[in-house]
Image (cartoon, rainbow, N blue to C red):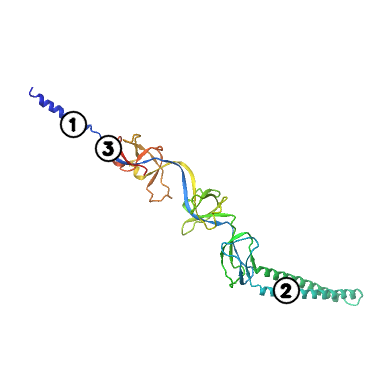
Amino acid sequence: MKHVPALAVLVFLAACQAEKVEAPPPVRPVLTTKVEVRTAETFGPFAGTVEPRYQTQAGFRVPGRMVARDVYVGDLVPKGARLAALDPTVLQFAVTRARADVTDAEAQLANASAVEGRQRTLFEGGNVTQAALDAAVATRDTATARLAQAKAALQKATDELGYATLKADVDGVVTAWSAEIGQVVSAGQAVVTLARPDIREAVVDIPDGLMAGITAGTAFTVTLQAAPTITVKGLVREIGPLADPATRTRRVRMTLVAPPEAFRLGTTITVALARATPPRISLPATALLREDTRTSVWVVAPDGKSVSRREVAVVPRDATVDPDDDAVTLSDGLKAGETVVVAGVHSLKDGQPVRLVASGL
């Protein structure tokens, strides 16, 4: 009976050791995020401006000194409106001279025709030779040609006098002036830039590496930077054939479909394109646990008290993605709404009790 207390002590110590071995693992605080499945991606946004499709640099067709300027930058002008004018004095002198030449040529033709008529009458009476008649006919033909030449010169001088007035070929808006009153301009020199405001385009520069899949007719969403709530559809009309050697971007022109008045020429805009993609999940790179050839994540149980390990499929990183971006894309292994651990993944094990610290990283 003296050994009974000692046996009881041994049983008590064994029970204590069993309880110590079977003690549950510690509860670890973890950072988590909710899984969101993306079925579309946004291409952009890219900044650009609103520009006219048709824009003309107009100039005088004759040289001279500019003496009038009737419109200014921003003015809307109708077709046929006068934009500017040259000093017409020299051109008026040319018209006067051409008219005098026509009068002289008409007199010469009348005289040559009369001489030819008299020579023909005398020839029929046998009083002059055939040579004399031929000479009179040649003189008359020469006078006729000189009259035609004088009339052509008069028409040219008259047209050039008209060219001293610069008029708008179409309804448009003045976007720039390249000459001032008193300046002597040469024929064909750009004086004013006129744009048609009825057909407007969005012009943007897009990196060459992102142009795959963008073709004529692709529809973008065009947004005013000053008023993001105002948007319109833009259809790709033209893609620059070569990339800019300095920026490695390509110029893309998009036709605006029924744009409101807020899309004025020169307005700054942004363009973006939403494209359907296979289901994808984006997670921070710290959520991945890589061991040998396995790539997995820790998924929090629905009750939020433990985690389990699950293998996932990682999408290879696109060469166009920013190398400083620490996000990874998964194509399989998770479902929308599940909770995933995004920090401390190397200190967990299956069934590990956890306490959620934060979510929505």
Q: CA distance from mark 1 to mark 2?
A: 127 Å
Q: Is residue 356 visible?
A: yes
Question: Left or right: 306 with respect to 22?
Answer: right
Q: Which mark is residue 27?
A: 3
Q: Amino acid at mark 1?
A: Gln
Picture quadrant of residue 51: bottom right
Asked whether disc 2 touches disc 3, contact meaning CB atoms under 8 Å apart, the reply is no
Q: Quadrant of the N terminus?
A: top left
Q: Quadrant of residue 302?
A: top left
Q: Badges 1 and 3: C-beta atoms under 8 Å apart? A: no
Determine the residue located farthest toward the bottom in the rendered image. 127
Q: Residue 343 location in percent, x, y?
A: 32, 43
Q: Which residue is identified by label 1? A: 17
Disc on the earlier residue, 1 or 2? 1
Label 1 Cα neighbours within 10 Å, binned few <14 / some 14-19 / many ≥20:
few
Q: Element at badge 1?
A: helix
Mark number displayed over residue 98? 2
Q: Position of residue 87 (x, y in %)?
A: 64, 73
Disc 3, SS: loop
Q: Secondary structure at mark 2?
A: helix
Is residue 206 visible in the rendered image? The answer is no
x then y, percent, for residue 21: 21, 32
